[in-house]
Image: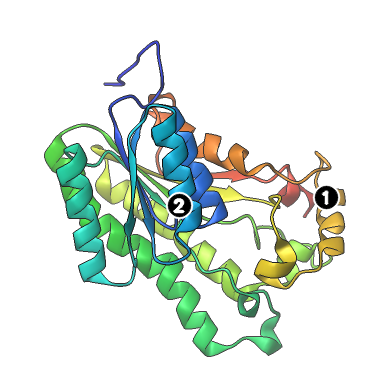
């Protein structure tokens, strides 16, 4: 049954966030902590972002820590999950936000690099399933309803070739398509104890040129192609993660929430 309360939506629950050194991962961790979750932030490198998010949660009176986590290394996964379980007594929420961000994945067919292709599928797809394999038994042993949130993507959902979201980033689109399909399959297999959903962000305010090699002026095109005529705030993704983790989404599983300002409606 849903655990309704009059206070914060995630009081007493334990959340693992992978890729917490990334922009959306760190924001998701902040949002979960703000709603009362005890948050374990996993980061493989560039820990400053994750450390800052954890410090913010602790300063506000919450519980959080940062640990080394490589989602492709079984030993690293086992150690991180064991440490989290020992600290907080279990795991209720898993947010698979670890993902590859590289300009090599934002190319058309003729420029696809097979090595880059393997890497994005390894991190985004295999990394997510390895985390699920480590965490699901712990969720089941705890006996409370668990929630897994994967990160998909709105890229490639349309059919209009003039829409930049459909005409580039073939490797990225393929990997995120696999994540969405995996989400649906996991939802069927892990029910009724564990819900599995995905959030698929659209164009979010970020450093697109540094991360993807996409000039900032090209983002004006993206803004013009969204009915809401703006880039998304990263915290809007964080709030969506909180919703999917909370009892408010207790009757949802196997769903992919497009948080994209209506971008995919434009074809």
Residue 223 marker: 1
Q: Which residue sits at x=56%, y=53%? A: 23
Quarter occupied by the N terminus: top left
Which element is circle 1 on? helix
Q: Quadrant of residue 267?
A: bottom right
Q: Is residue 261 above or below residue 208?
A: above
**Drawn side of residue 20 relative to residue 239, left or right:** left
Residue 114 seen by the camera: yes
Q: Residue at the spot x=52%, y=55% of the render? A: 152
Image quarter for residue 217? bottom right
167, above or below 146, in the image? below
Q: Horizontally, is 211 left or right of 251 in the view?
A: right
Residue 89 numbered mark, or none: none
**Farthest left residue?**
141
Which residue corresponds to mark 2? 50
Residue at 62% across / 86% down in the picture? Answer: 112
């Amino acid at each position: 049954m849903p655990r309704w309360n009059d206070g914060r939506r995630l009081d007493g629950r334990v959340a693992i966030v992978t890729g917490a050194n990334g922009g959306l991962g760190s924001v998701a961790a902040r949002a979960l902590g703000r709603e009362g979750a005890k948050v374990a932030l996993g980061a493989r490198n560039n820990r400053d972002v994750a450390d800052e998010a954890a410090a913010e949660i602790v300063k506000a009176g919450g519980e959080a820590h940062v640990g080394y986590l490589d989602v492709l290394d079984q030993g690293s996964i086992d150690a991180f999950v064991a440490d989290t379980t020992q600290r907080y007594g279990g795991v209720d929420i898993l947010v698979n936000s670890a993902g590859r961000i590289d300009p090599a994945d934002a190319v058309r067919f003729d420029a696809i690099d097979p090595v880059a292709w393997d890497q994005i599928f390894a991190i985004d797809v295999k990394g997510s399933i390895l985390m699920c394999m480590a965490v699901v038994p712990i969720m089941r042993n705890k006996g409370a309803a668990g929630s897994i949130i994967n990160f998909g993507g709105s890229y490639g959902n349309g059919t209009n070739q003039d829409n930049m979201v459909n005409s580039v980033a073939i490797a990225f689109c393929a990997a995120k398509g696999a994540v969405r399909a995996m989400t649906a399959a996991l939802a069927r297999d892990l029910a009724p104890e564990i819900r599995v959903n995905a959030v698929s962000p659209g164009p979010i305010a970020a450093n697109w040129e540094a991360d993807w090699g996409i000039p900032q002026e090209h983002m004006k095109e993206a803004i013009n192609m969204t009915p809401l005529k703006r880039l998304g705030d990263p915290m809007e993704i964080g709030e969506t993660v909180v919703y999917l983790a909370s009892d408010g989404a207790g009757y949802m599983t196997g769903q992919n929430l497009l948080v994209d300002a209506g971008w995919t409606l434009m074809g």
